[in-house]
Amino acid sequence: MNLKSSAEKATKHPFGELLGQYRARKSGLTQSRLAELAGYNQAILVRMCQGKKDLTGPSGRERIVRLIETLVDQGALSTQDEANALLLAADLPPLFDRQPNEARVIARLAHLPAGQRTRRTNLPAPLTSFIGRVDEIAEVRRLLGQTRLLTLTGAGGSGKTRLAQQIAADLLITYSDGVWYAELAPLADPTQVADLVLRALGFMALNRPALEQLMDQVRERHLLLVLDNCEHLIEAMAAFSIALLQACPRVTILATSREALNVDGERTWQVPPMQPEEAGRLFTDRAMAAHSNARLHPEDKIVAHICQRLDGMPLAIELAAARLSVLSLNDIALRLDDRFNLLAQGRRGALPRHQTLRALIDWSYELLTEPERKVFCRLGVFVGGWTLEQAEQVIRSEDFRPAEVLPTLTQLVNKSLVGVDNHRQPTRYYFLETLREYALERLVDEGTLNAVRHRHAETCMALVERCVPALHNQHQRNALTRLEDDYANIQTALNWTMELDHDAELGCRLTGALFHFWYIASGHHSDAQKWTGLAKRALREDMAPAVHAWVLMNEEWFSSGVETAEARCQHIYTLFEQAGDRIHAAMVKSILGRAVFYARRDYATALRLSEAAVDEARALGADWELRFNLTMLAECLRFAQHDPARAERVYHESMVLSKAAGDINEVA
């Protein structure tokens, strides 16, 4: 293999690649010329560029230091960062000032005239410390090694800008022609993108197209370009990025935007909320800056609570911490339900939309189309997430068809306003709590909150009714999971219908429908008692007998006292008879039998009622109710100690039927 082909192969090693970039800065500085100036045989330099033994050990380090001096002499290297990058590429420590030859190089670089130093970045100097994000930095750096266009997406205030700036600063020594930052937020005219970037790189605009001039200036340069806040110029930024990357093969772009540029070759990475421990450290650091006498610890429970309520959003956490100068921690925590007013204190020097939490979200909201705004606001009634089907039911109105929901929801996901969990079945979507509260405020302003809340409550009712049959068969686990997923929505609907007194009848119906869920999910018995109490107070005479029956059924099962159980069961039985619901009338008859036994120890009447309930359920083909009634009969037989052998046979029949149905709870 000749030296030329060896040199080409050498570029596959980081040291050879970086050395080649430095040589390219000086016209005529070929590999053979550099070897000659440094006093080496070219073959040695070739092997160094290939990462072979000439590159390593004490002698290899001496050769690299000599190369650095030569590059400085030729004007191809001008900073200590660049020199250290060459050593780092060879897996060697940076220049050491106690080694005479290396100290000489450090001194030369430090005393170069300003005109000979290469300006390699315009990144703004940070005014506060950068907290955490260790895993995120590692992941973004990994992705930058795999693509030339990486877009960091995320909701406003998630820390995209600060993360991009920190990563860019860390990578300064990696890009031989530097790292350059362009802030696009103040730019309103999409035709001026290239002009702004040109100025950011320090070039003067001439009397020709700015993009053409920019391409000429950076065509052969190896640099990282950070394009910050692209969302309001998304189409222009997409076209600009493609044109620049196609013309300049050694340029890499790191963009930040609420949504992806959506172009070929782009990789996207969504910036997540801060981890709890890191969020606590951020709050503590900024709080102590705002109030020097503050004595906080990142792991304090109240600090963790505040950070969790603020969704781990760095901007919101910093704004809340700044309030410590006038409020106590407890005051801040108590006022988070009114977070937009709490976090309304502006920060001088910040972008206008970063000065308050409301201004930040206003910026995102104003960039939405009218259909996107409608969907965004109406989704605010959901608590704990929603499915596509639920969104279609709640958003529907005379001005919005269900078929329009999915494409609009997709746009909200793309714009980082809605999160998606596609590991769940069905797929669930969710808001950060801060965005949800903003959406609700918009609904209040529009005067449509109660109408959307009503559709939300109806959607919860439909979900419960659909899941009830599956709670007692082989689909039991899925039905329980589905209802648990939406339990926060269900409780919100109960609160709106009854506690806030907007639709008491719907709330009573929903309470009654939850009997089967509460019967199985024993961890919610206290909720059953709470909502049943509210529902009973909300009952009206004009409500259907079935509504009364189910509310009282809940009271009997979850809250009753023995002294009133018999009379209440008799009343519930009558209500189900009036409603024409013979299946549940039979079920109540078995509960009445148990009540008679416990209240009066009237075994004969209790047994008669329980046996009749079993016979009626069997005749009606009511599968779960038959199993329930068999269990009530077996209990009557067992606790009366009258016929334990028959009790065992009845229990066994109930268990066999439950196994056949796949009802794990009833088997247990």
Image (cartoon, rainbow, N blue to C red):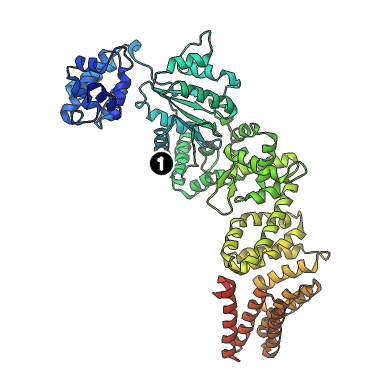
Q: Residue at x 28, y 26 (%)?
A: 16
Q: Residue 654 at what x, y percent from top left?
A: 60, 79
Up the image or down, 390 lies above or below 91; here it is below
* Residue 179: x %, y % from top left: 41, 24
Describe residue 103's horizontal placement relative to residue 261 as left or right: left
Please say whether residue 202 is visible from this viewpoint.
Answer: no
* Quarter occupied by residue 642: bottom right
Q: As displayed, is residue 389 above or below residue 312?
A: below
- Judge from the rendering whether residue 400 lies leftward or rightward of residue 341; answer left or right: right
Residue 257, x across and y down, in percent: 54, 32
Under mark 1, the amino acid is Asp
Tag 1 residue: 135
Q: Name the residue at the top extreme.
A: 207
Q: Nearer the viewer, residue 217 or 508?
A: 217
Residue 248 horizontal/vertical position (percent) = 44, 21
Q: Which residue is outermost to the right?
A: 542
Q: Quadrant of residue 113?
A: top left
> Is residue 196 or residue 260 the one in the foreground?
260
Quarter of the figure that contains the C terminus: bottom right
267 in relation to 457, above or below: above
Task: Let me know if residue 643 appears in the view.
Answer: yes
Residue furthest left in the image: 59
Q: How many marks?
A: 1
Mark 1 closeness class: few <14, some 14–19, many ≥20 residues within 10 Å: few
Apparent side of residue 545 relative to residue 122 in the rendered image (left or right): right
Residue lying at 16% horizontally and 27% vertically, measured from the top left: 59
